[in-house]
Amino acid sequence: MSKTSLLALHRSLALVFAPLLLLQALTGAALLFRGPLARLVDLAGMTASARGPSVTVSTLAASAEARFASYRVQRMFLPVTREGTVFVELAGADGSTRFASLDPASARVLAAGSVWRFPLEAALRLHYRLMNGRVGLCLILANGIILALLAGSGLGFWWPGRTRVLKALAIRKSTPKRLKLRLWHRSGGVTLSVVLLFSAATGILLVAPDIPEGVGQANLGPAPLRSPTQIDDAVALARAQFPGSPLRDIRFPVADRIDLNFSAPERNPRAVHMVSVAVSRREIIKSLRAAQNGVLWMKVLPLHTGDSFGIAGRLMLLVEASMLAFLAISGPTMWWRGRRARRGGK
């Protein structure tokens, strides 16, 4: 493909997807530090002595469901730090959702409402699926593919040969102001093109496997049959499978089953041991160590979020997100300026 064709492809794709790329950059930047930011939102009003759930899981679930009488708990996230709160997602029979954060020491509701009451949860759902099911996933998948094409086409159009790389990235002070935005756009995009390609590839690997089933609300089925005692017995039974691992989250997919995930940092920062319990029979249905679990997301997610590389990885992705936001704004700005110039400034 000629350089002229590469530039035309780059411009066309960028103009169409710039708003979505900007949204991904902003939400991605916020999610890099989701835990600390969420704690800042929830700290007000939390009991100072909270050290993790000192009340039972059934008490936490009952407190959340009491706040939304026609809803039931679908998922519960336990705190991973001393200052953390319990975060609960609830679903109604019509598929609508509500959320609540609870004090883990008392089960008191600290905040409750729709997803917009919790900005970091809203950012996650926008970043991953645009608040939608299969359609949202498909758009995010397309966005990942387009980001890879933009990074590749921009790099291909710019490539000056191995011996002139540094010179071709330079921005001279004498460059006219009207051209500097174009040069910053070029040099910034080229410098981070490898990181952009990495994020695009890992994002595609995370989203694509979920598209066949979508991620809409699960079928709620009949009213739950679980009693508080059954819930707590199931949790205790699951904890016995991995006694040295902290409980990360609990899912309530159907009336007679509970799925529990235990953190497994020995494998990677996002890995989990998985346990499924038949509530009424007080029986382990499945128990799977993280090391034996071959699901793709467990390998790819810590790469995509930068967790595999510690704080340095998250800071690099923050730089990438900032540059992507700049590219998503500067690209259309340059196009608009060129369009006005061709029309004589009218």
Image (cartoon, rainbow, N blue to C red):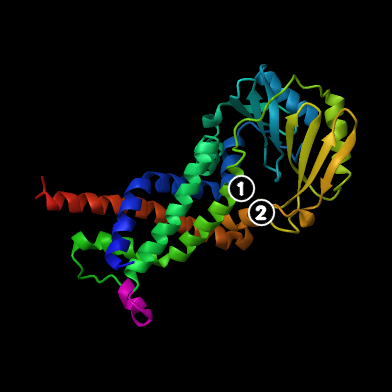
Main secondary structure type of the part rendered in magenta: helix
**Rendered position, 332 above or below 90:** below
How many numbered marks are there?
Answer: 2
Residue 53 % position (x, y): 77, 36
Q: Give the extent of the magenta segment.
A: 160-169
Q: Is residue 54 visible?
A: no
The three-letter code of the residue at mark 2 reads: Leu
Q: Is residue 321 visible?
A: yes
Give the image quarter of residue 9: bottom left
| Element carrying mark 2 | helix
Residue 14 % position (x, y): 34, 52
Please tell me whether residue 327 belongs to the stretch shown in magenta.
no
Quadrant (top left/top right/bottom left/bottom right) for the N terminus: bottom left
Could you tell me which residue is drawn at 30 percent across and 67 percent down? Answer: 2
Residue 125 % position (x, y): 54, 39
The three-letter code of the residue at mark 1 reads: Pro
Instruction: Report crowding for label 1: few under 14, some 14 to 19, many 20 or more residues within 10 A (C-alpha).
Output: some
Task: Say whether residue 100 is left or right of residue 145.
Answer: right
Q: Are marks 2 and 1 in contact (CB under 8 Å)?
A: yes
**Rendered position, 318 above or below 232:** below
Could you tell me which residue is drawn at 55 percent across and 31 percent down? Answer: 115
Question: CA separation, marks 2 and 1?
Answer: 8 Å
Quadrant (top left/top right/bottom left/bottom right) for the C terminus: top left
Could you tell me which residue is drawn at 18 percent across and 65 percent down? Answer: 176
**Rendered position, 230 above or below 36:** above
Which residue is label 1 attached to? Answer: 209
Q: What mark, if any, has residue 95 been given in the picture?
A: none
**Front position in the image: 50 or 145:** 145
Which residue is label 2 attached to? Answer: 296
Q: Earlier in the sequence, mark 2 or mark 1?
A: 1
Residue 261 % position (x, y): 75, 44
Task: Give the farthest residue toward the bottom.
Answer: 163
